[in-house]
Image (cartoon, grey):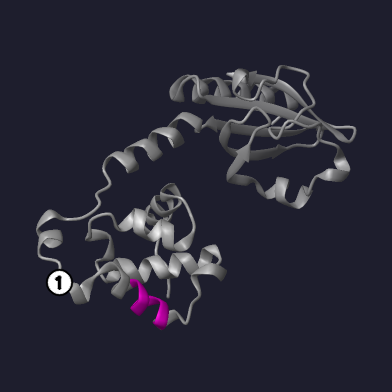
Amino acid sequence: MTKKEAYEFLCNLAEGIANMFGNNCETVIQEFENGKICTVAIFNGHVSGRKVLSTQGILGGTLESDEIDYDKIMSGVYNQLVVHPSGKKIKSSSFPLKGEDYFYIFGVNYDITLLETMNLFINNFISFEGDLLTTLRQEKENSMDHILESCLQVMNGNVNKMKKEERMILIKLLMDCNFFQMQKSVPFLSEKLGVSKYTIYKYLNELGNSSLDI
């Protein structure tokens, strides 16, 4: 494939993906030459604020040759989180295409800022303090204090010295004990751990979408 053919192919691909996934999807073609990376084509550039001939990377700075791990670039870098200087959160992937007289990098960058905000709103909206029937039938020996103390004994933990990983393990134990079916369990736990209710909901969300080996 000649340099012109490679460029035309990447431009068609970039334009098609940008049109398919909408205004939040930036596609960019960059060329590595003379120790620098330069943007030679871009669609939906408002996502990162870049234009053609820009030497800025998705992180906002100029990409110099001595700052880049070329082994990773040559194998591709996929599904990476980028926190842009503007505050946007972006999912980013890049794909190399190298020929005899060219080295192109094809990038796809999707602005997930609004999606993340919506996800937090939805998780908060559909969360419950507890199951009504379970709450009304709650027995004293199954109180929140009792369950929390039992889980802490299993961990030999001190709530004042816990790191995130330890809190996640504690919350997994509490989930197994149906702790979060109790009324006001989240505010209770957030006060005990000295963290916000938002943090507890975030932990619960992470545990709900992945497995934790305890």
- Coordinates of residue 135 in the picture (x, y in percent): 15, 60
Which residue, given by chain and number where applicable, does mark 1 sit on? 139
Q: Nearer the viewer, residue 16 or 135?
A: 135
Q: Is residue 65 above or below residue 200?
A: above
Q: Main secondary structure of the magenta part?
A: helix
In front here: 17 or 121? Answer: 121
Q: Which of 118/56 is in front?
A: 118
Decide whether residue 163 is among the magenta residues: no
Q: Is residue 86 above or below residue 134?
A: above
Q: Is residue 9 above or below residue 157?
A: above
The quadrant of the rendering that contains the N terminus is top right
Q: Which residues are magenta?
A: 148-153
Give the residue type that dot 1 points to.
Answer: Glu
Q: Quadrant of residue 62?
A: top right
Q: Position of residue 56 (x, y in %)?
A: 77, 28
SS label for mark 1: loop
Give the residue drawn at x 13%, y 62%: 134
Magenta run includes residue 152:
yes
Lateral position of residue 214 relative to residue 140, left or right:
right
Is 104 left or right of 8, judged from the image as shown? right
